[in-house]
Image: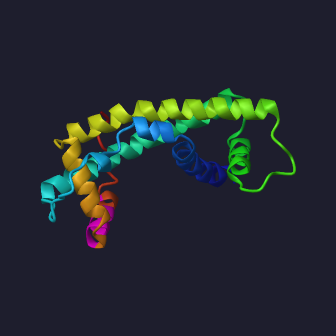
């Protein structure tokens, strides 16, 4: 019963780290901001396979980051559920009946700072995953944008990601 809550909380943690930590995104690589306005309308099969392999590596990097985020929460003496409750309270447009204690607020801010560091530390790993597959960052961004704009390509990538689950991607 705790696993589904924790898993959904972890997804929320990743999203929360981006939503609360715009500075981490600004300092990080925004691949789409680096690409030129002319994206290739077609993606060669080899590049599509390279893109899929990068996505698999990124999934591992993101899972590692989520584990580090859980540890960051626990190291400050909160549970993931309590952290999510504080996050929800802070994001709520209406004030809560129970204001946050100074201690909880301090813990929360420390955790957010750790999340930013975790996200910043994942950037070189993601870059390495791109380069190790034979793509440059700009081309990766072009492929990513092309896929985002083409539902048929999105389905093809999903299928490619699902077909190769027996063979884990090499770690960078």
| Prevailing SS of the magenta stretch | helix
Residue 40: x and y in percent read: 15, 60
Q: Relative to 29, is 24 on the left or the right?
A: right
For the view shown, which residue lies furthest in the bottom direction? Answer: 152
Examine the rendering and report whether any part of residue 64 can be seen: no
Identified at 58% across, 30% down, the residue is: 113
Residue 42: x and y in percent read: 14, 64
Q: Which quarter of the rendering shows the C terminus?
A: top left
Residue 159: x and y in percent read: 31, 65
Identified at 84% across, 43% down, the residue is: 99
Magenta range = 152-160
Q: Does residue 41 show up magenta in the picture?
A: no
Q: Is residue 54 above or below residue 92?
A: above
Numbered marks: total: 0
Examine the rendering and report whether any part of residue 51 can be seen: yes
Return the residue nearer the eye: 160 or 40: 40
Q: Which quarter of the rendering shows the N terminus?
A: bottom right
Identified at 60% across, 53% down, the residue is: 8
Identified at 31% across, 71% down, the residue is: 151
For the view shown, which residue lies furthest in the right direction? Answer: 97
Q: Quadrant of residue 149?
A: bottom left
Q: Relative to 84, is 142 on the left or the right?
A: left
Q: Quadrant of residue 37?
A: bottom left
Return the residue nearer the eye: 43 or 93: 93
Residue 170: x and y in percent read: 29, 38
């Amino acid at each position: 019963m705790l696993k589904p809550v924790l898993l959904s909380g972890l997804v929320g943690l990743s999203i929360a780290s981006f939503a609360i930590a715009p500075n981490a995104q600004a300092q990080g690589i925004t691949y789409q901001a680096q690409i030129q306005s002319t994206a290739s309308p077609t993606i060669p099969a080899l590049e599509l396979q390279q893109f899929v392999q990068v996505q698999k590596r990124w999934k591992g990097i993101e899972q590692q980051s989520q584990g580090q985020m859980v540890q960051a929460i626990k190291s400050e003496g909160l549970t993931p559920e309590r952290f999510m409750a504080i996050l929800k309270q802070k994001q709520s447009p209406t004030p809560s009946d129970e204001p946050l204690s100074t201690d909880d607020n301090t813990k929360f801010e420390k955790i957010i700072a750790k999340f930013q560091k975790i996200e910043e530390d994942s950037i070189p790993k993601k870059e390495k995953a791109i380069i190790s597959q034979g793509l440059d960052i700009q081309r990766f961004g072009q492929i990513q944008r092309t896929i985002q704009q083409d539902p048929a390509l999105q389905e093809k990538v999903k299928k490619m990601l699902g077909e190769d689950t027996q063979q884990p991607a090499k770690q960078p």
